[in-house]
Amino acid sequence: IHANSCVLYTTTEPCPMCFAVMNNAQISYAYFGAPFHPTQFLPLSVKYLAKYAKKYPIKVKGGILKKECLEQREKLWKR
């Protein structure tokens, strides 16, 4: 599936594995609300990975509705 005209919106920053799927699908833009949770150990951020996506570049922007996304994540984690 090629989704080069698609935009991904997510509440939390995508992990490196999700980024690989996004890149393989040729998604052009990714917007996320909250950064990784402090308890998650992820050595590479999606913004860092996006710099090196040369074949299918992905533009990434974070902090979209950050407060609301953090609230949603906290509700989910309390379950």
Image (tube, helix red, strand yellow):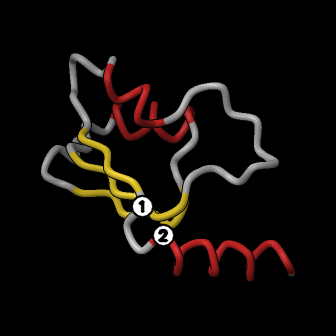
- In this rendering, is residue 78 above or below 34? below
Mark linked to residue 40: none
Q: Residues within 10 Å of mark 2 (few under 14, many from 20)?
A: some
* Residue drawn at the location 52% of the way across and 81% of the way down: 68
Q: Nearer the viewer, residue 14 or 71?
A: 71
* Residue drawn at the location 52% of the way across and 34% of the way down: 45
Is disc 1 placed on a helix, strand or loop?
A: loop
- In this rendering, is residue 64 above or below 32? below
Q: Quadrant of residue 71?
A: bottom right
Q: Nearer the viewer, residue 36 or 67?
A: 67
Q: Quadrant of residue 48?
A: top left
- Would you say the residues marked 1 and 2 are in contact, meaning their CB atoms lie under 8 Å apart? yes
Residue 72, given in percent of the width and then of the height, sits at: 63, 80
Residue 28, given in percent of the width and then of the height, sits at: 20, 43
Q: Nearer the viewer, residue 46 or 2?
A: 46
* Residue drawn at the location 55% of the way across and 33% of the way down: 16
Image quadrant for the N terminus? top left
Farthest residue toward the left?
5
* Residue drawn at the location 21% of the way across and 29% of the way down: 57
Looking at the image, residue 55 sits to the left or right of residue 36; the answer is left
Q: Amino acid at mark 1?
A: Gly
For label 1, the residue is: 63
Q: Amino acid at mark 2?
A: Lys
Q: Quadrant of residue 42?
A: top right
Residue 7, given in percent of the width and then of the height, sits at: 24, 57
For label 2, the residue is: 66
Residue 27, given in percent of the width and then of the height, sits at: 26, 44
Give me the C-alpha separation between circle 1 and circle 2: 5 Å
